[in-house]
């Protein structure tokens, strides 16, 4: 059994711990999460531990990135379980602030990243990236790690965070880490826990359909027709609806008409009340 993971819940305590590490010449890595941890999160912690001497994981279910009709209330929460998993993955410190620490009375700042935030998730969840950029800028500035680690599973989020960090001169390296998948290819996500057995089977079709669309585009199909065919296949597989499936410029996420630059396929689709997202390099 691992020793219980130390936890801090306010900014001065977080900074004290990190200052002591810095004084000892240690590199610090940060893994921001909303908890409900799975193997994908743990792989971020392990990567952070390879690249830094000490790893801090943050646990905060950020209300500002959920719209009123979304799943903030039912989002899975299990700090004790998360903490045990983090200890076994080599995490050194859990930072679990409450809402009053992150957004004290009178909090009035919103960090908005334009351009890369606008399409795809930005269109279907217009509140989302403002909430993410605000909380992530706070977490980075509260802890000032050497590097922060984010999953490519939330690919557009990763691009938004990279842009924000660069634009605001936040002195932290942003590292993207490969998506971790179940044995049938379904991207790991805390929201997979919402799926019933039938939905779980259908969910695994999404990554296969995306692979087929990549093959079609690489074989010379027009981007728009590869996207349209993939969208039809997602519906035919049993998904309730498709928000988007799009092949885009890998950095700006702008629409493209050919594969002359690095491209990414990104999708979001609903299974009942659960929204799944996935993406892959083309
Ligand atoms: O990807 C997530 O879990 C969240 O969006 C993040 C980056 C922790 C911000 O709340």
Image (spheres, rainbow, N blue to C red):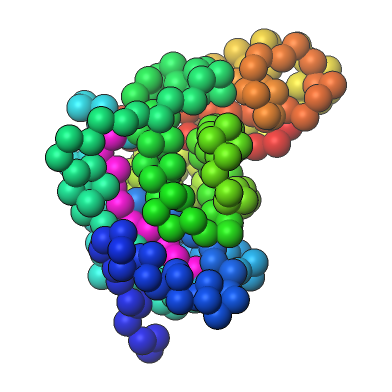
Q: Is residue 226 left or right of residue 148?
A: right
Q: Is residue 193 magenta?
A: no
Of residues 254 and 245, the one nearer the viewer is 254
Of residues 205 and 169, the one nearer the viewer is 169
Q: Is residue 14 left or right of residue 187?
A: left
For the N terminus, the quadrant is: bottom left
Q: Residue at x 23, y 42 (%)?
A: 103
Q: Say above or below: 281 vs 51.
A: above
Q: Is residue 93 left or right of residue 204?
A: left
For the C terminus, the quadrant is: top right
The location of residue 6, given as percent across then percent down, is 33, 77
Q: Is residue 59 magenta?
A: yes
Q: Residue at x 45, y 76 (%)?
A: 20
The location of residue 126, given as percent across then percent down, is 37, 20
Q: Residue at x 29, y 43 (%)?
A: 62
Which stretch did the figure color magenta? 55-64
Q: Say above or below: 92 vs 192.
A: below
The location of residue 235, given as percent across then percent down, is 47, 21
Question: Can residue 24 be seen by looking at this rendering?
Answer: yes
The location of residue 125, given as percent across then percent down, is 37, 23
Q: Residue at x 56, y 23 (%)?
A: 116
Q: How many marks?
A: 0
Q: Quadrant of residue 272?
A: top left
Q: Say above or below: 51 vs 281.
A: below
Of residues 215 and 12, the one nearer the viewer is 12
Q: Say above or below: 42 vs 166.
A: below
Question: Can residue 197 be seen by looking at this rendering?
Answer: no
């Amino acid at each position: 059994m691992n020793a219980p993971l130390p936890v801090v819940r306010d900014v001065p305590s977080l900074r004290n711990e990190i200052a002591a590490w810095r004084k000892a010449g240690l590199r610090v890595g940060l893994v921001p999460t909303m908890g409900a941890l799975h193997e994908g999160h743990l792989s971020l912690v392990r990567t952070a531990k390879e690249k830094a001497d000490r790893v801090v994981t943050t646990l905060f279910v950020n209300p500002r990135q959920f719209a009123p009709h979304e799943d903030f209330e039912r989002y899975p929460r299990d700090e004790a379980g998360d903490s045990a998993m983090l200890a076994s993955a080599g995490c050194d410190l859990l930072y679990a602030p409450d809402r009053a620490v992150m957004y004290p009375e009178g909090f009035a700042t919103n960090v908005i990243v334009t351009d890369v935030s606008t399409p795809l998730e930005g269109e279907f969840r217009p509140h989302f990236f403002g909430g993410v950029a605000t909380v992530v800028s706070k977490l980075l500035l509260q802890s000032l790690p050497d590097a922060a680690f984010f999953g490519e599973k939330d690919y557009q989020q990763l691009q938004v965070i990279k842009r924000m960090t660069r634009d605001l001169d936040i002195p932290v390296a942003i590292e993207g880490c490969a998506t971790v998948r179940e044995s049938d290819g379904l991207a790991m996500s805390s929201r997979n826990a919402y799926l019933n057995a039938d939905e779980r089977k259908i969910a695994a079709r999404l990554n296969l359909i995306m692979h087929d669309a990549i093959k079609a585009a690489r074989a010379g199909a027009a981007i728009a027709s590869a996207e349209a065919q993939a969208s039809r296949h997602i519906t035919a597989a049993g998904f309730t609806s498709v928000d988007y499936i799009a092949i885009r410029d890998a950095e700006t996420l702008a629409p493209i008409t050919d594969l002359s630059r690095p491209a990414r396929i990104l999708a979001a689709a609903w299974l009942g009340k659960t929204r799944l997202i996935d993406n892959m390099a083309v």
